[in-house]
Amino acid sequence: MSLKGFMEDAYQGRVRQGRLKKGASEPVLSIEDLADRVGKRPGKREVAEHAPADPRLLFRLLQSRPEDPRGKAIWGYLTSLAAERAEGPIEVLPGDYAGLELESGGIVVVAGVEGGPPGEHIGERMSGGRIVVRGQAGDYLGQEMQGGGLVAQSCGNYAFRNMAGGWGVVLGDAGHYPGLGNRGGRILIRGRAGDRAGWLMNAGRLVIRGDVGEYLGMMMKGGQILVKGQAGSRAGWHMRGGSISAAKGGPESGEEGGDVLGRILGRTGH
């Protein structure tokens, strides 16, 4: 019998179990420590079970900048847990997945001293609370939001993709595909928006105060789109439901949309 087997037999596994319990009770000092405990594809519940209860240790983890996708997701869950446990809004530097699955509380994403790239996936799958981005947000802002509110100065592509509820405001310009697949969210873009805004919308509301690019509301089935500025070419193509209102339409707007496109206002740009 090996030494390991002898010890297991003699102590009936108590030595090994004691070591496991001791390791589990050791404090989490880094994102890497936490990643070792939550598995390869952790959810918010797993991260919450192993996250430090001490707010000081939790905020210390938020100062790290993981590079791998799993570490970024864990960091995002930690920002939400910190906000939900805090008495008031918390501030974090830009990072991917800030406010991931936020349920309550507030997060203010502030620009770092040295700038750096804007965070992507901010506010993803949030269902409550508030997030304010002081500066530019990256791609996938507010993706799959279910509730709560999100405000950003500007953003990249795919903002509020597959949004089901809540509201989002972009104070400046948005990239391409804002409101793609919107299923019930309320979106306001105060500046301009890129191509294919409101593509595949099923429900909800999208308001753009500036001009918008091509294929506005393409293949939408429901919801409402209101553009205060000029819509680009081919607005409403293959549209099956919902309504589009624009101050001025671009070339070929709605030519394949059928009767539904009679709801487009101000189509003098044909």
Image (cartoon, rainbow, N blue to C red):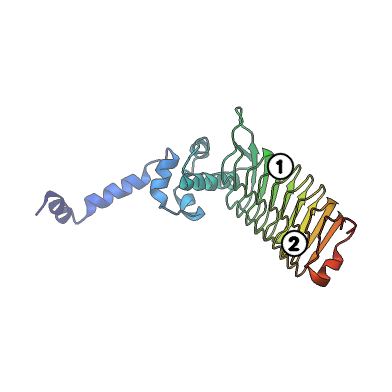
Would you name the residue on which mark 2 appears?
204
Q: Does residue 43 appear to the left or right of 219 in the view shown?
A: left
Image quarter for residue 30? Answer: top left
Q: Position of residue 115 (x, y in %)?
A: 61, 31
| Furthest residue in direction bottom, as rendered | 259
18 to 261, vertically: above or below: above
Would you name the residue on which mark 1 appears?
154
Q: Nearer the viewer, residue 234 or 201?
A: 234
- In percent of the image, x 70 and y 56: which residue is there? 179
- Quarter of the picture containing the C terminus is bottom right
Within 10 Å of the Cα at label 1, are there few (<14), some (14-19), or many (20+) other Cα atoms? Answer: many
Mark 2–mark 1 Cα distance, whole angstroms, equals 21 Å
Name which of mark 2 and mark 1 comes first in the sequence: 1
Q: Position of residue 111 (x, y in %)?
A: 64, 33
- In percent of the image, x 67 and y 58: which residue is there? 163
Q: Nearer the viewer, residue 210 or 80?
A: 210
Amino acid type, residue under disc 1 in the picture:
Ser
Image quarter for residue 200? Answer: bottom right
Q: Does residue 107 appear to the left or right of 217 in the view shown?
A: left
Secondary structure beneath label 1 = strand
Q: Position of residue 94 (x, y in %)?
A: 60, 38
- In percent of the image, x 73 and y 55: which residue is there? 197
71 to 101, vertically: above or below: above
Q: Nearer the viewer, residue 59 or 206?
A: 206
